[in-house]
Amino acid sequence: MTISLFSGQGSQYTGMGMDLLNADPSLGFIYDTASDILGFDLKNVIAESDAETLSRTIYAQPAIMATSLVCLEAAKKRGFEFGGVAGHSLGEYAAMVASGMLSLEDGFRVIKARAAAMDKAAKNAEGAMCAILKLSAEDVEKLCEEIDGYVVPANYNSTIQTVIAGEKAAVAAAAEAAAAKRARAVPLAVASAFHTKLMQPAADEFYEAVKDVKFNEPAVKFYSNVLGTKLTDFSDMPALLAKHIVSPVRFTSELAEMQADGFDNFVEFGPKNVLTGLVKKTLKGVAAKNCESCETLEGVMA
C-alpha cells in the first residue's frame, strides 16, 4: 500500500517545483489560489527570492505547502493513488488538503494564519533548535532533563535523530553535553524554538483565526504528529492544530504505525528528500521515494 508524505519547514529552496510548472502550466492554479489568499505572488516568491527571504516563516510555510501540492497533483495526473497521508510539522497541512480534510482555499487560509502567528511569536521569543544525532530518543530526553533552563525534544525524527528546542542558552548547553557523549549536534537555521511552549502565543492566536474553518473527515488514513498515531477524531481540528504548534513531532511513532497498518510504499512530495531519508533510516522492508521535480516524478511513476 502507498502513503503520501509531505515535507516540513527548512526544506525550501529557490525555484523548487518550477520545472513541473513549466512542463505543465495547468498546475499553476495552485499558485494562483494561494496568491489570492496570501495577498502576494507566491510563485514569484518561490522563483525569484533569495534563500534568506524564502526562509522567512511567512513565505516558507505557504511556499513549501504549494510546492508539495504541485508535486502531488503532477503525480495524480499520471495515475498516482494513495491510501494514507502524513506530514512532518508544516507538512501536515499539505496532508490535510491532499486527504480532502481541507479545501485548497481553506488550506491556504489556515497556513496563512499559522505562518503569521508563528512569525510573530518567533520575533518575541529567543529560542533555538538543534538536531542531536547518534543518541537514542531516551538518551536525549534524559540529557534535556539534566540541563538548567528550558530545553526539550521537539522532533522525534528517527531512532538516531532527535531535534531539541528551547531557550538558546539551554539548547547550547544540551548540544555541548551531547557532544561530550560522542553524539553530533547540528544547530538548525530556524527563527525560534518551534514545537515548544515558547510558541504558546502563536498557538493561541492561530486557534482564534481558524476556529470556524470547516474540516472534513479525510478520504484516506491520516496520521498525526501530536499523537504519533492514526487520527480518528476530527471533531475539533482547530484545537488539535493549535496544540500541534507547541507539541513535539512524533514522526518515528507515526512511521511504525503506518508500517503496522500495511503501508510499504512511502512517497514524499515536496522539496528535498528529508522524510524519505528518515523512512529509510527507521523502517526495514519498505520502499521510499521523493517527488520534487520532473526527474523524480519519473522515478515515482516507474
Image: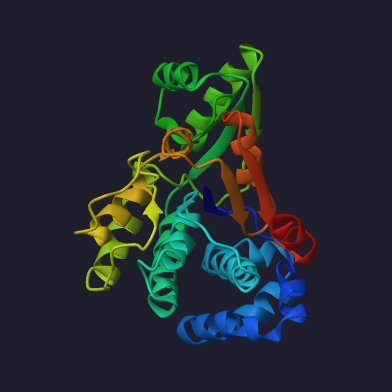
* Percent position of residue 96, x then y: 41, 63
Return the residue found at the far right.
295
Q: Residue at x 59, y 27 (%)?
A: 132
Q: Position of residue 146 (x, y in %)?
A: 42, 16
Q: Where is 158 relative to 98, above or below?
A: above
Residue 187 visible in the displayed image: no
131 sits left or right of 19 in the view: left
- Using the image as rendered, state which of residue 135 and residue 260 is in the foreground: 260
Residue 112 quadrant:
bottom left
Task: Look at 51% across and 80% down and name the residue there.
Answer: 34
How many numbered callouts? 0
The single residue placed furthest to the top in the displayed view is 181
Residue 98 image offset from top left, x and y in percent: 47, 65
> Residue 284 sits in which quadrant?
top right
Residue at position x 50%, y 49% from top? Answer: 88
Q: How is the image coloured?
A: rainbow
Q: Residue furthest left?
A: 235
Expressed as whole percent of the image width and height from the top left, the position of residue 232 reads 26, 50
**Quadrant of the snapshot with the C terminus:** bottom right
Q: Is residue 217 visible?
A: yes
- Image height of 212 relative to 268, above or below: below
Query: In front here: 138 or 26?
Result: 26
